[in-house]
Amino acid sequence: MRKTALILPFLVLSVFASAQGLFKTIIPTVPVVAGESFRVQYFVEDASAITDFTTPDFRPFKLVTGPDVYPGEKNHQNNFRQSKNYVFTLVAAMPGKYIIPGAVINSNGKLLKSNEVRIEVILKENAIQLLNKEQLQVSEYYLRPGEDVNEKIRQNLFLKVMVDKRSCFVGEPVVATFKLYSRLESKSDIVKNPGFYGFTVYDMIGLGDKQLATEYVNGRPFDVHTIRKVQLYPLQAGRFTIDPMEVKNKVEFSRSIVNKKTEQKIVEGVLNDEADIPVSGTEMVETEMSTSPVTIDVKPVPEKSKPATYSGATGRFTIMASLEKSVLARNEEGFLVITISGKGNFIQLEPPSIKWPDGVEGFEPVVNDSTDKTQAPLKGKKQFRYGFVCGNPGNYLLPAISFSFFDPDSNKFKTVFTSALQVSASTEEIKTILEEEKKTSIAEQSEKISRIAVGIVIMLVLGILAYWAFSKKDPAPVIVVAEKSVPADEILQGVITLQSAEDKEFYKGLHLAVWTYFTNHIELTGSARNKENLLMILKEKGARKENIDTLSGIFSACEAGMYTNASLKADKEMLLQKTKEVLGEIEKSLF
C-alpha cells in the first residue's frame, strides 16, 4: 500500500516576534464552531536544525489527532529551505474565548517557543447568523442551494504540469513538476502516470514525500501538493511528448452550513477499493481530470568541433585521477580511481576509456554515485574504481585520461584531462607480505599456538583423507554453498585437495570458499556483493584492522591467480592456513 498524502487547508499565519518569524503558531482566523474539529499548525520555516519538538497542553480542548508532521519547502530570498509543519486536530466542546498555547522546539541547542494565539468558539446557530450577515466566510465544503457542482469542482480542484523549458539539447535536463491544487474536501486517485518516452527519468519528489504548500490563484489561496517532480534527460534529438497524468476524484460537499476546513487525500491505484458511504447531510460527487500533454523539442549537439572522445556527457564537469597505492607487490591488485565532478547528466555517464600500458591488465570498474537529487541538473560526483594487476616488476606510466562534454550554457564542447600517474611493481610478492603478517601475529599473540597446532592436526587428517580420495581416482571435490553457522574450517575443507591442482583452480576454489563463508553471515546481493563493501561492513562490525588487511591481501592473491596469466610463486599451503586463521578470528569475534 502506498503512502497517502494530506493537503493542509490554507491557514493565516500569526507571527511570533521573539522567534523572528522562524517558528509560528497558525490557527483559523474565523471563529470555530463548538463540537466541530479545527486545526492548529506549528510551522518551522527552517527545519534543518530541529532536534526536538514538545507538544503543548491543549486542555480544555480535546485532541483528536496529532502531531501529523509534513515536510515542505519555503522560498526565502530565492533560497529554498526545508520547512516542517506539526499539525494537530482539536475539538472545543463549549463556546467561549480560549488561548492556544505555543509549542517548543530545540534548534541548534536553543529552545524556541512559538506565539500564543486567541481563538473564539461559537455555537452553530451563531455561525449561521454571522453567515447571513456576510460576516463569516464558509469554506468551499458547503454546497449552496442552486450552486453548479461541476463548475465549483472545476474552479476549485485541478491539476497542473509545469516544465522549466520546452527546448533543450540532447543530455540537457528538463524539469517537470505535477501539482494538484485544491480548495475542496476530496480524495484523489492517480490512475495513470505520464509516460516519458525518449527520456531517462530521475525522480526528485514523489507522492510519499508529502511536499505541501499554499499558492494563490486569481487571488484565492489553494492547498498545493507536489505529486511528482522529475528530471528528464533526453536520449536523442527529436520532438517528444510528456503524456498526461490522469486522476479520478471523489469530492464531498455538505448541504448544511459548516465551517469545516477542507482536507485532501491523494493515493495511487487504491482509492477505487475503498467504499465511501456519504454521511447524512453530505453529497459525494465523482469526477476525472488530467494534465495537458507537453511537447519538448530536443536539439542535437553541434557536429562542428565535436571531439572524437565525446560520448554524450552534457553539463559542466571536472575530472581527477588517483592511485590508492603507487607501489605494489608483484601481482598485487592496484586500484585507479577516476572521479568526475560537476553538474549534468550523471545518470548517463559512461566509464572513461583507460589505455593501460603494456604489462598491465585492467578490469571493469566499480561505479559509485554521489549526487544531490534536489539540484537540476544533478550536482555531485561519480567515481569509477578500476582494479588492475602488473604482470612483471617495473615502473609503469598510466597515461593522462581525457573526458569531453558539451556545455549547453556556452554551446561549446570542452575537454578536461587528468594527470599521468606512475605505479611501481616491486619484486616483493604477496607471499612475503602474508608470511610477515603471520610471524607478527604469532609474536603478538602467543595464545594462538595451541589453535594452530590443532589446525595442523586437522589438516594432516584431511590430507590423508584427500590422498585416499585421489587414489580412488574420484573427481575433485566441488565447493558447495554451506548453510549458515557452518564453521570456516568446514567450508575450507574442500580447498585442501585443490592445492595440487592448477593455480587458477586453487585460487578460484579458495575465493569461492571465502565468499561462501561470508555470504552465510552477511547479506550481500547484486552489485553490493564486492570486496570493498565486505571489508567496510567488517570494519563497521568491529573487526580488527590487521584481520581486515590480511583478508584484503588474500582477496588480492586470489584475484591475481584467477584473472591473470602471471606466474605465481605464493605458497598455497601457507595462504590456505592464513585464510583459516583470519576467518577463525573473525568468526570468534563477530559471529
Image (cartoon, helix red, strand yellow):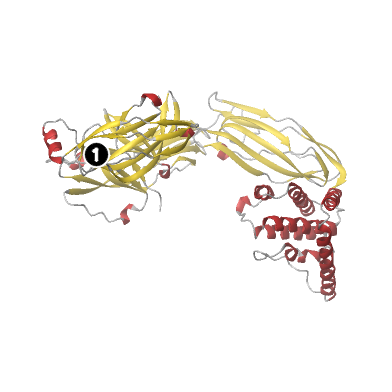
Residue 165 visible? The answer is no
The image quarter in which residue 89 lies: top left
Quarter of the image with the N terminus is bottom left
Q: Residues within 10 Å of mark 1 (few under 14, many from 20)?
A: few
- The residue identified by callout 1 is 154
Residue positioned 35% across, 44% down in the render? 66
Q: Position of residue 28 (x, y in %)?
A: 26, 34
Q: Identify the amino acid type marked 1.
A: Arg
Front-most of residues 37 and 308: 37
Residue positioned 30% across, 55% down in the render? 274
Residue positioned 34% across, 26% down in the render? 15
- Side of 155 where 492 appears, left or right: right
Q: Position of residue 211 (x, y in %)?
A: 40, 38
Quarter of the image with the C terminus is bottom right
Residue 408 visible? The answer is yes
Q: Position of residue 315 (x, y in %)?
A: 56, 30
- Side of 163 where 108 appears, left or right: right
Q: Position of residue 466 (x, y in %)?
A: 82, 71
Mark 1 falls on what kind of element?
helix
Q: Is residue 394 above or below residue 476?
A: above
Q: Is residue 287 above or below residue 472?
A: above
- Side of 64 where 46 appears, left or right: right
Q: Is residue 565 above or below residue 110?
A: below
- Side of 367 where 236 appears, left or right: left
